[in-house]
Image (spheres, rainbow, N blue to C red):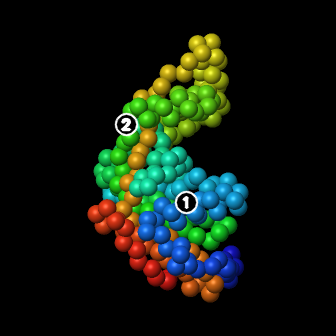
Amino acid sequence: MTRYLAEIRKGYQQSSFKPAELAIVPIVIFKKWFQDAQQANTKERYWMLLAPAGTIRMTSARFILIRVIGELVFIFYSDYTSKIKKELAINLSAILFRFRHLLGGLVRLIGGLKEINRQDSDYYFRSQPNESKIVRCTSTQSKAKTNRLMLEHIFQNIRNNFKKRGLIPILKNSGGYLVIRYVVKFWQGRQYRIQDLLQYILNGDRWKLNQATS
């Protein structure tokens, strides 16, 4: 098996970054890549891998759904009682990865994190389907689940209860995080593994662009 894996080779035939594509701000390229993923109908286009920085001698990562893409920030939502909350309490910074599976590209972002205001978190909670709200009432993220059948039973009981009451209360133990980007790297696979690399570093209120191969 090890020998077989070592023999696997994949060449990327994507075109290189053209001078006209080298935007002043990295969000232009990110949105372009996101649109490419939409056109390619990749189902995981909203997912990113979040790795909080500064945890105690350990690397921890989890997949998140990006819900807002802004000029300098991303927003995602999570359970405030989960493991990620404890990790972010150690160091409010993180690295995010976004892989363009079918298009041979990778985005790596480094940024600071902070909780968004309660009003915006409540608005997002109200916008979710009722089943998603009930799941948040049923299960806590990052906690061990010993019995799935029991969880499904609890879910159904809560669902029936809220059908009678007609209103699902807003949970205050979950909400959003802002990811404030200050380093953005774009990696584009190329033929013969001569890959393209763009690195944007925020310097004051302007982005500095470095272009290289890897």
Q: Which amino acid lies under the numbered mark 2 shown in the image of this protein?
A: Asn
Residue 24 drawn at (x, y percent): 43, 69
Q: Residue at image x 67%, y 67%? A: 102
Residue under numbered circle 1: 31
Residue at 48% across, 61% down? 27
Spot occupied by residue 75 in the image (x, y as percentages of width and height): 46, 47
- Label 1: element kind: helix
Q: Position of residue 37 (x, y in %)?
A: 64, 60
The answer to whether 197 is drawn above or below residue 53 in the figure is below
Nearer to me, 188 or 147:
188
Up-down: is 157 above or below 103?
A: above
- Left or right: where does residue 132 sit relative to residue 177? right
- Counting every numbered tag in the picture gives 2
Q: Secondary structure at mark 2?
A: loop
Q: Amino acid at mark 1?
A: Lys
Residue 10 x/y as whole percent: 67, 79
Q: Is residue 15 left or right of residue 117?
A: right
Q: Nearer the viewer, mark 1 or mark 2?
A: 1
Q: Is residue 4 visible?
A: yes
Q: Is residue 198 left or right of residue 105?
A: left
Q: What residue is drawn where x is 65% and y is 77%?
A: 14
In the image, residue 173 sits, relative to residue 15, either above or below, namely above
**Location of residue 54 by image quarter:** bottom left
Residue bearing mark 2: 117
User: In the picture, which quadrant includes the N terminus?
Assistant: bottom right
Tell me the crowding category of disc 1: few under 14, some 14 to 19, or many 20 or more residues within 10 angstroms, Cα based. Answer: few
